[in-house]
Image (cartoon, rainbow, N blue to C red):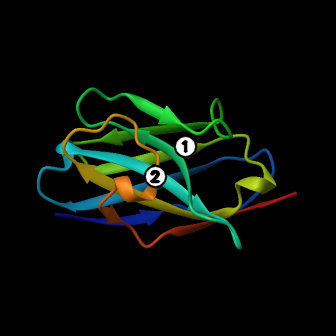
Amino acid sequence: QVQLVETGGGLVQAGGSLRLSCAASGRFFSRYSLAWFRQAPGKEREFVAAVAWSDGSTYYADSVKGRFTISRSNAKSTGYLQMNSLKPEDTAVYYCAAVSGPYGGGRTSERFDYWGQGTQVTVSS
């Protein structure tokens, strides 16, 4: 089992950058695939990015491809989401999620077993 805590959210102007962190506690962090989801007011939670534990493969939503980068540090038991060229439509609560075992790029919330509490990202125009 793993517990996740997100930090790094805040208010930024359009075109700016933020880096979100997802600190994990628990054993065998390196065997968990990590993902970021986001949920804007009045909208469903949506997939943003994921990184597989087995081979480091990364997956991105089309809306963030080329602007966001997901990464992880197993030594620090922390995942990251570097967000560049932010747009007002990126405004949302961002959640970190994790799942153990084989992962082939699934993008639904149900695919992941563990969730953080979320961090707010607001992009002003």
Question: Residue shown at 30%/41% (left/top)?
Answer: 73
User: Can you identify the residue that label 2 sits on?
Assistant: 108
Is 88 on the left or on the right of 99, as rendered? Answer: right
Residue 77 can be seen in this image: no
Q: Position of residue 42 (x, y in %)?
A: 71, 73
Q: Is residue 57 above or below residue 36?
A: above
Q: Residue placed farthest to the left in the image?
A: 27
Q: Is residue 91 above or below residue 16?
A: below
- Front of the two marks 1 and 2: 2
Q: Is residue 56 above or below residue 7?
A: above
Viewer-side residue, 71 vs 93: 93
Q: Earlier in the sequence, mark 1 or mark 2?
A: 1
Structural crowding at the residue carrying mark 2, measured as other residues with C-alpha within 10 Å and reported as few (<14), some (14–19) or many (≥20): few
Residue type marked 1: Gln
Q: Is residue 1 above or below residue 108?
A: below
Question: Residue shown at 48%/62% (left/top)?
Answer: 95
Q: Position of residue 33 (x, y in %)?
A: 30, 44
Residue 50 can be seen in this image: yes
Label 1: state its secondary structure.
Answer: strand
Residue type marked 2: Thr
User: Can you identify the residue that label 1 sits on?
Assistant: 82
Q: Position of residue 108 (x, y in %)?
A: 46, 52
